[in-house]
């Protein structure tokens, strides 16, 4: 292999900020932040969702209030009408 063609493959600490879960894995991702974890310094990557916080893995599905969104849309654009309302009426 040619020298200096491959990115550095190293241990990285990923931090799920939604539930304060941290895990270490290996990656070539480039980061600007570092963190000391268990006495060793690691490059830090902050993420929003991991297996600890994703509803599929946790079993805690959130119910979205779609009825409220529909009513808000109808109040805002109800006067304009839609093509389906014209066709049906």
Image (spheres, rainbow, N blue to C red):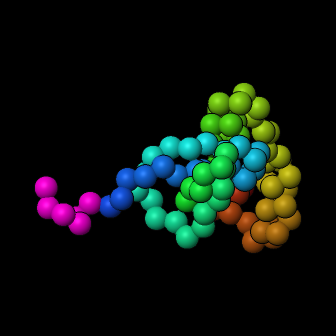
Q: Is residue 40 left or right of residue 81?
A: left
Q: Is residue 53 magenta?
A: no
Say whether residue 30 is left or right of residue 85. Answer: left
Q: Is residue 6 above or below residue 58?
A: below
The quarter of the picture where the N terminus appears is: bottom left
Q: Quadrant of residue 50?
A: top right
Image location of residue 61, percent across then percent down: 75, 34
User: Up-down: is 61 above or below 26?
Assistant: above
Q: Position of residue 48 (x, y in %)?
A: 67, 53
The one of 57 and 67 positioned closer to us in this rendering: 57
Q: Is residue 4 visible?
A: yes
Rendered location of residue 42, percent (x, y): 57, 56
Report the residue at 78% width, 39% height from top: 62
Q: Nearer the viewer, residue 39 or 15?
A: 39
Assign the magenta stretch its main secondary structure.
Answer: loop
- For the image shown, how many numbered marks are present on the structure? 0
Q: Residue furthest left?
A: 1
Q: Which residues are magenta?
A: 1-6
The residue lying at 81 percent from left, 55 percent from top is: 69
Between 54 and 16, the one lying in front of the other is: 16
Please name the residue shown 48% across and 49% down the image. 11
Residue 56 lies, in percent from the top left, at 65, 32
> In the figure, 78 relative to 47: above or below?
below
Q: Quadrant of the C terminus?
A: bottom right
């Amino acid at each position: 292999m040619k020298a200096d063609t491959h990115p550095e493959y190293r241990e990285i600490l990923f931090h799920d900020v939604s539930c304060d879960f941290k895990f270490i894995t290996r990656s070539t991702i480039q980061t600007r932040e570092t963190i000391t974890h268990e006495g060793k310094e690691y490059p830090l990557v902050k993420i929003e969702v991991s297996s600890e916080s994703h509803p599929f893995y946790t079993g805690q599905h959130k119910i979205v209030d779609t009825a409220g969104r529909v009513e808000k849309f109808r109040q805002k654009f109800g006067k304009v009408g839609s093509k389906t309302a014209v066709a049906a009426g």
